[in-house]
């Protein structure tokens, strides 16, 4: 093997041995940036996720990527002045649940798990409730506070 070929192989070997380190550093920086994005600048830690007009127009405010993660907000079926907010990721297999206003429940499109507005399981196969958030109206905005 000539010198040039040897150095080429040695360089490729050295570089490939460093890739796991580079991948780990990239992941750490990414996680650090995500954690910073999840903090609210408001003293009460609520973050805006949409407008009241959007919520009332569609019956559900679904935000797949907010500062606190995925969130779905609906008017409470028992008190239209109150809001119910959940993480819409089904606890069975991770599909996004949809609010069915006629049934007043969140339903998973993948396996038909049903959840109440407060996240409780109404119908399986899911066995764990949806995580819930505090939600409120302020001005024209819908605000949600992560746990």
Image: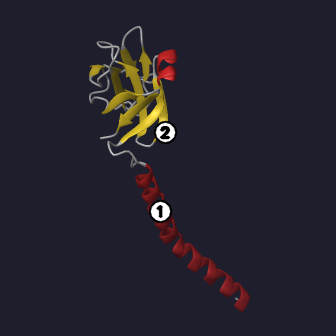
Secondary structure beneath dot 1 equals helix
Identify which residue is drawn at 47% across, 67% down.
25
Asked which quadrant contains residue 146, the reply is top left
Residue 5 drawn at (x, y percent): 71, 85
Q: Is residue 115 left or right of residue 62?
A: left
Q: Is residue 66 left or right of residue 122?
A: right
User: Foreground residue, 124 or 40?
Assistant: 40
Residue 129 appears in which quarter of the rendering?
A: top left
* Picture colour scheme: secondary structure
Residue indicated by mark 1: 29
With respect to residue 75, does 38 lie above or below?
A: below
Say which element carries label 2.
strand
Residue 5 position (above or below residue 97): below
In the picture, the quarter occupied by the N terminus is: bottom right
Q: Quadrant of the C terminus?
A: top left
Q: Is residue 117 left or right of residue 10?
A: left
């Amino acid at each position: 093997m000539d010198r040039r070929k040897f150095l080429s192989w040695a360089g490729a070997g050295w570089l490939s041995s460093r890739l796991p380190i580079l991948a780990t550093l990239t992941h750490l920086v990414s996680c650090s940036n995500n954690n910073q994005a999840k903090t609210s600048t408001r003293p009460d830690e609520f973050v805006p996720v949409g407008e009241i007009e959007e919520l009332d127009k569609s019956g559900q405010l679904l935000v797949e990527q907010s500062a606190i993660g995925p969130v779905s907000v609906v008017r409470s079926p028992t008190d239209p002045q109150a809001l119910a907010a959940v993480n819409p990721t089904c606890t069975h297999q991770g599909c996004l649940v949809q609010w069915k206003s006629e049934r007043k429940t969140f339903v998973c499109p993948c396996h038909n798990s049903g959840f109440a507005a407060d996240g409780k399981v109404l119908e399986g196969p899911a066995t764990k409730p949806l995580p819930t958030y505090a939600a409120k109206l302020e001005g024209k905005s819908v605000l949600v506070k992560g746990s």
